[in-house]
């Protein structure tokens, strides 16, 4: 058992004075550091895990619904109607999704992540529920449409009324003094931490930033277009956004079409549904293992190189003539390779951007660019290519090879840039303007490889 956190030594610090930049801060006590991490893990991870699980289910379950009767019920089996409907759904879902990614990260701080994320989840859940009432490929005649649009749009003001009622009710629910429905917006708002632990959490953020943050507390960081430009015109943002685009293509196509691919091996619909579970479970454990290893070695690139190579092996197995059981085994390699790559590439960019608004802009832009790949993924597996789906497998291999190239380029760039900073070749930036505006360009900041 870890020893109890020791009181902070030297001068007594408060949440108010810790927010000032201080490059002389001593290293945080290891016992206090572990205690803070353990509390964040306990109070944040279960809820964030649940939110992401529920959010991703609605992206992948259309593949299961297809072989369970969705295509027949909506008369989508002929030609590429299923893919076209998928594209129509993407136009409704992904275009607004892509457009609001970056602004959403900006307003996240204003509304507070603890309330903003659950509100988005509840709203989208209601929209997803309504899709269950769809009965055919065609929806409404032209002159029956506007009233239905009015019924849909009136949900906007109605949601404001329900939002107030829900907020009032949920705010009264407590669990040992902690409200699980409203997650903390920042370390300083984490009521499950003691005063000492809150100060320690802010101190370790400052230590980790190495000069990239003008303040350790995001509550005191003001929006500026300077931080937006710092994120957009950045080599890491460009390379890792394209890298995520390459990674997410096989992830989306795998999630959407895995039941179809397995059914093409010759299994019944029921077996195909059940056989999607083991590969996804392998992917689940691969994500846990890959991200744990990545944090341990404090590197993202090597993990991505290994995982992408593993996924390529899986797609090659699907391409070569073999028994259905061998082809099915290839899906395990794919799941173990593509799924850990997504958090790795997202975390990589987040590690290499600072401060808060720069990171929020960069990661939002990365996700927006990556989600454009959904337009490709929707058409990677079409009915005419069954049962071998060589075109789809080949496209995904090409995307994974692209990811290998981009990952290698990023690793080379990061290593060269860190070397220049270590040799003092970027120290001139300290004399060109306000040091607080350097962000991740600060000579003391080191990129994660």
Image (cartoon, rainbow, N blue to C red):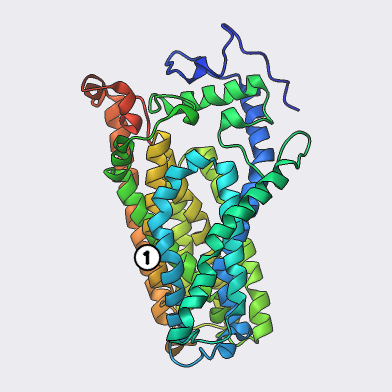
Number of other residues with Cα within 10 Å of mark 1, as a class: few under 14, some 14 to 19, many 20 or more? many
Residue 449 appears in the figure: no
Image quarter of the N terminus: top right
Quarter of the figure that contains the C terminus:
top left
Q: In x, y percent, where is residue 128? A: 59, 68
Image-based side of 436 in relation to 328, left or right: left
Q: Position of residue 289 (x, y in %)?
A: 59, 50
Q: Is residue 170 above or below residue 29?
A: below
Could you tell whether 370 is left or right of 50 in the image?
A: left
When the figure is inspected, residue 81 is found, relative to residue 100, above or below; the finding is below
Residue nearer the viewer, 387 or 61: 61
Q: Residue at x 37, y 73 (%)?
A: 395
Q: Residue at x 68, y 83 (%)?
A: 270
- Residue 196: x, y in percent? 64, 19
* Figure quadrant of residue 97: bottom left
Quadrant in which residue 24 is drawn: top left
Residue 432 in view in this figure:
yes
Q: Quadrant of residue 214?
A: top left
**Residue at 55% in and 42% down:** 113
Residue found at the far right of this picture: 176
Q: Which secondary structure lies at badge 1? A: helix
**Apparent side of residue 36 relative to residue 106 in the rendered image (left or right):** right
Q: Position of residue 219 (x, y in %)?
A: 49, 30
Q: Which one is nearer the viewer's eye here, 107 or 150?
A: 150
Count the marks: how many?
1
State the residue position of label 1.
399
Question: Could you tell me which residue is drawn at 51 percent across and 90 percent down?
Answer: 77
| Residue found at the far top of this picture | 10
């Amino acid at each position: 058992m870890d020893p109890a956190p020791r009181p902070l030594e030297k001068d007594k610090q408060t949440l108010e004075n810790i927010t000032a930049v201080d490059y002389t801060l001593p290293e945080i006590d290891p016992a206090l550091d572990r205690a803070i991490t353990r509390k964040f893990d306990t109070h944040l991870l279960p809820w964030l895990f649940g939110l992401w699980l529920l959010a991703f289910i609605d992206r992948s379950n259309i593949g299961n619904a297809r072989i369970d009767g969705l295509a027949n019920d909506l008369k989508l089996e002929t030609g590429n109607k299923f893919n076209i409907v998928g594209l129509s759904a993407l136009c409704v879902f992904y275009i607004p999704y892509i457009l609001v990614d970056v602004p959403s990260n900006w307003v996240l701080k204003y509304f507070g992540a603890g309330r903003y994320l659950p509100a988005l989840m509840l709203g989208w859940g209601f929209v997803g529920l309504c899709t269950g009432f769809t009965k055919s490929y065609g929806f409404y005649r032209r002159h029956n449409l506007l009233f239905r649009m009015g019924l849909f749009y009136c949900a906007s003001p109605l949601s404001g009324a329900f939002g107030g009622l829900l907020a009032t009710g949920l705010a009264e629910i407590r669990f040992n003094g902690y409200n699980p429905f409203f997650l903390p917006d920042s370390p300083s708002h984490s009521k499950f931490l003691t005063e000492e632990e809150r100060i320690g959490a802010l101190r370790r953020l400052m230590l980790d930033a190495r000069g990239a943050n003008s303040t350790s507390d995001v509550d005191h960081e003001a929006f500026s277009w300077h931080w937006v430009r710092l994120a957009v015109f950045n080599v890491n943002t460009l390379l890792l956004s394209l890298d995520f685009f390459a990674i997410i293509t096989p992830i989306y196509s795998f999630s959407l079409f895995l039941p179809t691919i397995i059914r093409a091996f010759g299994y019944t619909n029921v077996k195909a549904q059940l056989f999607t579970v083991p590969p996804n479970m392998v992917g689940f454990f691969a994500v846990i293992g890959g991200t744990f290893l990545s944090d341990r070695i404090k590197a993202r690139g090597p993990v991505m190189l290994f995982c992408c190579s593993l996924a390529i092996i899986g797609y090659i197995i699907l391409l070569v003539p073999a028994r259905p059981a061998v082809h099915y085994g290839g899906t395990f390699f794919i799941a173990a390779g593509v799924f850990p790559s997504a958090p790795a590439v997202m975390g990589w960019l987040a590690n290499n951007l600072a401060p808060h608004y720069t990171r929020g802009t960069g990661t939002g832009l990365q996700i927006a660019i990556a989600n454009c790949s959904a337009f490709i993924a929707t058409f990677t597996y079409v009915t005419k290519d069954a049962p071998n789906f060589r075109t789809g497998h080949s496209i995904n291999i090409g995307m994974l090879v692209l990811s290998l190239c981009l990952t290698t380029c990023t690793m080379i760039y990061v290593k060269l840039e860190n070397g220049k900073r270590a040799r003092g070749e970027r120290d001139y930036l300290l004399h060109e303007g306000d040091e607080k505006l350097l962000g991740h360009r600060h000579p003391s900041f080191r990129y994660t490889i």
